[in-house]
Amino acid sequence: MVGRLEQGLGALLILIILLDIFLTVLYARIGTGIIGIRVERLVWACFVKASKLLGSRHGSVLSFCGPVILVLLVGVWALGLTLGAALIMHPELGTSIRATNGETPTDFVTAMYAGGTSMAIVGASDFTPHTSLTRLLFLFNSLIGMSVMSLTLTYLMQVYTALQRRNVLAMNIHFLSGCTGDAAELLARLGPEGQFSGGYTNLSELGVEMTQAKEAHHFYPVLFYFRFNDPYHSVSRSTLVALDTVSLIGSALDDQKHRWLREAGAVAQLREASMLLLVSLENTFLPHGAPDREAQPDQQTRDLWRARYHAALQRLRQAGIQVTADGQAGAEAYISCRMQWDHHVTNLAPSMAYSMEEIDAAMSGLGSKDGPNDPRSRLRVAD
């Protein structure tokens, strides 16, 4: 009776591990894992606590989190399958499963070894099945071992391919903005002397790359935990610059000359993909998820945004770009646009241990201070 219960637990454990592998690798949807998502959150929490002990070097510690999560996740899968096989084989040791040479030990460590080798080494185990059921068990274990190994290697390669593409997007935005992280600088470089015909291609490419980044995080949620020391590699910086660029296109450019750019599909794609990426990550990784409604900034924050807008107008004029004649109306339009996305960025950035001074370079240049005195930290959801 005890042996049957032990074998039942082993079969259940194998099914749970296989289901987690299926949801993580094959089904590939954000927030659907059983074990993996809990491993990721636990490891990240441990890294965050450890990083706080190192002060200014916290970024170096956090940069190891993503790779460590992948190693532990593969280890948990391998250990779970081995333990499940051991629970099934343990009652059969010495009877239907015997050592190839000599007397067969019946302790659980031996069962772990038999279970692990039956999955990892096809036809080369030190133990031999002597009944039809145990032969099928060994065959089933070898098929599981080969399949899981192939799926895991493929998954790891796809994760790093997606990470490389996300980094390319971040670097493109960084370089197009003159390594400043300022959307006004990016827009000025896309349309020097008001000629956006060439820069529109770059804008279209950014829209496509942002869409790919959104889908990559949807398929491989572990990407969220790959943090780099440089803030320009972060999703928060990329989405902020992209959304700020779209907001300036809609509020700062002359309506007559540049109406076509405002209504271009690439601009809409860049905005929607950036918003979907932010909201998806908030819903999955933040304790309370994304806010249901737009945050209402206080007057000091509105004044900062207005100052940021007028600074952007000045930079666009310097680049020879024709801007709106009504700066006051444009500032209000910019504030209205920014209200739709700014709180998503300020929610997400601290979750990856970035300060808003690192993420929002343009606002930092206006003298905003990150922390409890930062006006952006006082944004509140409307009652």
Image (cartoon, helix red, strand yellow):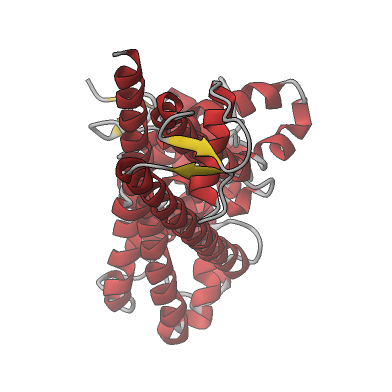
- In the rendered image, residue 27, in percent from the top left (x then y), is placed at 29, 52
Q: Is residue 331 visible?
A: no
Q: Residue furthest front?
A: 102
Query: Residue at position x 60%, y 24% from top?
Result: 46
- In the rendered image, residue 362, in percent from the top left (x then y), is placed at 57, 49
Q: Residue furthest top?
A: 2
| Relative to 147, 27 lies left or right | left
Q: How many numbered marks appear?
A: 0
Between 338 and 329, the one lying in front of the other is: 338
Query: Residue at position x 35%, y 42% from top?
Result: 131
| Relative to 44, 24 lies left or right | left
Query: Residue at position x 26%, y 73% from top?
Result: 265
Between 257 and 135, the one lying in front of the other is: 135
Between 104 and 240, the one lying in front of the other is: 104
* Quarter of the image where the N terminus is located: top left
* Quarter of the image where the C terminus is located: top left
- In the rendered image, residue 168, in percent from the top left (x then y), is placed at 56, 66
Q: Is residue 191 visible?
A: yes
State which quadrant residue 143 falls in. bottom left
| Location of residue 247 with respect to 22 vertically, above or below | below
| Location of residue 72 with respect to 120 vertically, above or below | above
Query: Residue at position x 73%, y 39% from top?
Result: 60
| Location of residue 50 with respect to 355 vertically, above or below | above
- In the rendered image, residue 197, in percent from the top left (x then y), is placed at 41, 86
Between 56 and 3, the one lying in front of the other is: 3
| Relative to 257, 181 lies left or right | right
